[in-house]
Amino acid sequence: MPVKMTLHKGNVPVKIYTDEVESSSLNQLEDISQLPFIHHHVAAMPDVHTGIGATIGSVIPMKGAIVPAAVGVDIGCFVGDTKIPLLDGTEATLKELTERGRECWVYAVNAQHQITGAKAFAKLTRKNAPLMRVVLDNEAEIICTPDHQFMLRDGSWCEAMNLRLNVSLMPFYSHLEAQQRIIKPLAILTTNADNHKVRLVQSLQQREDVYCLTVPEYENFALSAGVFVHNCGMNAIRLSLTANDLPDNLKPIRLAIEEMVPVGFDQHKIPQAPSSTIQLLDRGIEQIFEKHPGIAKMLKKPHHTWTQQLGTLGGGNHFIELCLDENQDVWVMLHSGSRGIGNTIGTYFINLAKKDIEAHSIPLPNRDLAYFREGAQYFDDYVEAVHWAQEYAMHNRREMMRLILDALRKQFPHFEITKEAINCHHNYIAIEEHFGETVYLTRKGAIRAGEGELGIIPGSMGAKSFIVRGKGNPESFCSCSHGAGRRMSRTEAKKRFSHRDMEDQTKGVECRKDKGVVDEIPQAYKDIDQVMEYQNDLVDVVHTLKQVVCVKG
C-alpha cells in the first residue's frame, strides 16, 4: 500500500505507512521534521511507535549531522579499490560499483559449491574502519575488516582475523571464457582446480572507508583476487531439519538453548568467544575508554562485563526462535544487540550531545534530539564508538548462533545449514544517496529493503515472522519495518494481561508463559499481517515462518 498519512508541520514532510499511530509518535515525528539538517522528508514504517527522542520505526536522512538518539550502527567489509569480477567479462572496484548506483551481476557459490551468476548491490557501509591484510599464494592481496568472512574450501566460513596460514579458500578462476559469461550469465560452473591458500594474515595500523556487496540469493561473491567471501553476517538460518524431525515435546530443546545462552541480566561465567575476537574488540574499546573514561566509569568491571556478555541474549524484545516455514523446514532466528556496553555507549553520547547543544544555546524542539555536527569536537569519536558497538553486536550474534547450533546438535547430530538470510540491522546509520544527496540515513526500528535485498521481519511471540525481499521503494528510502511494533507500553501490558492470558495467546509455542514475560504478550504488539499489508509496496514475502520454540530474556 502507498503512504497512508503525511504530516506538513515541520521543515520537511513526514510520510507514514500506516494510519494506526499514537499521538505521542505523531508529536515526535513532527519534532524530527523541524530539525534544520533533515533532507527531503522523514519516513515512518507501519510498525511506528513512540521511542526516546526519535520515533521507533522512523527513517531519517540527515545532511552533515547525526542525532545519537536516532542512531545505531552498521558494518563494512573491503576498501573501495577492491576489484570484483563481473559476469560481462569486465571487473570494477567496489567504489566504482557504489558510484554507479545500480544493480550489477557477479559470481557467487551455490549450496552445491558450484559457481553461478547473482545480482548484487554495492554500497559504502562504514567510514574509518580498522583493516587487515590477507595475502594468498597467487600473490593476490586483500585489504578488509578483521571480521569479514572468507569461504573455506569445504564451504564453511572463517573471519579474516582467524584465518590460519596455508588454509585453503574456495577458489574462483577468472580464466573462464568471457563468451560463456556473457551468453550464459546463469550457467553453473564447477570449481575443480587447485585451492588458493593463505600465506599471510596481518593487522594494519591504517583505517579507511569500506564497502560491501549485498547478494540477495547467495550471500557471497567472488573477488578478483580469486576467492569467495560473505556479503554480511546473519541472524536467521534454515536447517536441513523438518517438522517431522522435531519431538512432540519441545521443552527440552528450549531448556538446552537457555542453558547454553544466558538471557536477561545473566552472563557467561567465563568468556566464551575466541581469544582473537576478544583481543580485536579490546583494542578498539580501550581506545574509546582512553578518550572518554566516563564510559568505563558507567560500567561495573567493564572488561569482565563486555567479554562475558558476548554470546548472551539480553532482555526486552530480544529472542531466540525455532520456526517452521511454509515447507515445514526448520529455521533458527535470533534478535539481539550490543548488550550493556552498547547501551552505555549510546547513553553516554546522547548525554554528551545534550551538553554540547546546551553549551552553544542551540534551540531544539525536543532536547532528546540533540545532535553532533560533522566536524564538531565529538562527531568522529561518536562514529568510532557506535561502529565498535556494531562490531560487538555482530560478534555477539555469531557467538549465540554457534552456541544455539551446539545445543541443537546434542539432539540432532547430523543436520546441516541449508540457507542463510542476510544480517538484518536495525537501529543504525548508513551513508547512502537519496533524492540527489549523500546523507547519513538512520533506521531506528527499521531495516534496509533495497531492490532484491533479503531482510527479516519478526512478529510477536506466537505470531508469524517473514523473510522478505526488498523492492527498493525510494519514498521509504529503501526501507521497511523491523517487526510488528508495540501497540501498548510494557507497563500497560503488565496491567492488562496475566500469565493465563499469556498461555492462551502462545498456544502451540514452547516458551516461558510466566508473569515475567507478560510485557511481551502477542496482543501488546500490532497485528503483523496488517503491518505486512501496509508495506506491500516495500517488500515481497519470500518465506512465512511460524514460531514453535521461543526463548525470551
Image (spheres, rainbow, N blue to C red):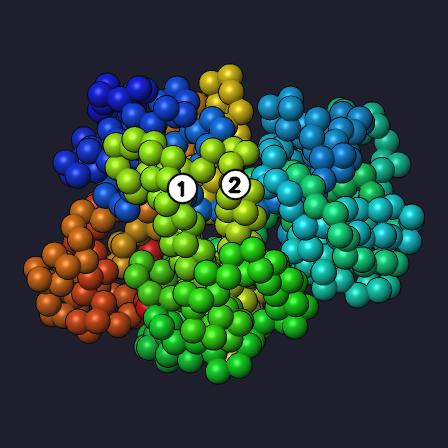
Residue at the (58%, 71%) spot, across then down: 273
Residue type beneath disc 1: Asp
Q: CA distance from mark 2 to mark 1?
A: 9 Å
Name the residue located 51 percent from the left edge and 75 percent from the top edge: 304
Q: Which residue is mark 1?
A: 356
Proximity of marks 2 and 1: CB atoms separated by less than 8 Å = yes
Outermost residue on the bottom side: it is: 269
Residue 397 at x, y percent in the picture: 50, 61
The kind of secondary structure element at disc 1 is: helix
Between disc 2 and disc 1, whose residue precedes?
1
Q: Is residue 379 visible?
A: yes
> Along the line of sight, which residue is nearer the eye, 326 or 421?
421
Percent coordinates x, y for residue 88 in the rendering: 76, 25
**For residue 214, what is the image quadrant?**
top right
Q: Is residue 59 above or below residue 51?
A: above
- Compared to 302, does 123 lie above or below? above
Question: Could you tell me residue 415's position as x and y percent?
Answer: 55, 68
Label 2 secondary element: loop
Asked whether the viewer can see residue 473, the reply is no
Q: Which residue is mark 2?
A: 377
- The residue lying at 51 percent from left, 36 percent from top is 376
Q: Residues within 10 Å of mark 1 (few under 14, many from 20)?
A: some
For residue 17, side relative to residue 85 (left or right): left
Viewport quadrant of the N terminus? top left
Nearer to me, 38 or 4: 38
Three-letter code for the amino acid on which mark 2 is drawn: Gln
Left or right: residue 106 compared with residue 438:
right
Q: Is residue 303 or residue 471 the one in the foreground?
A: 303
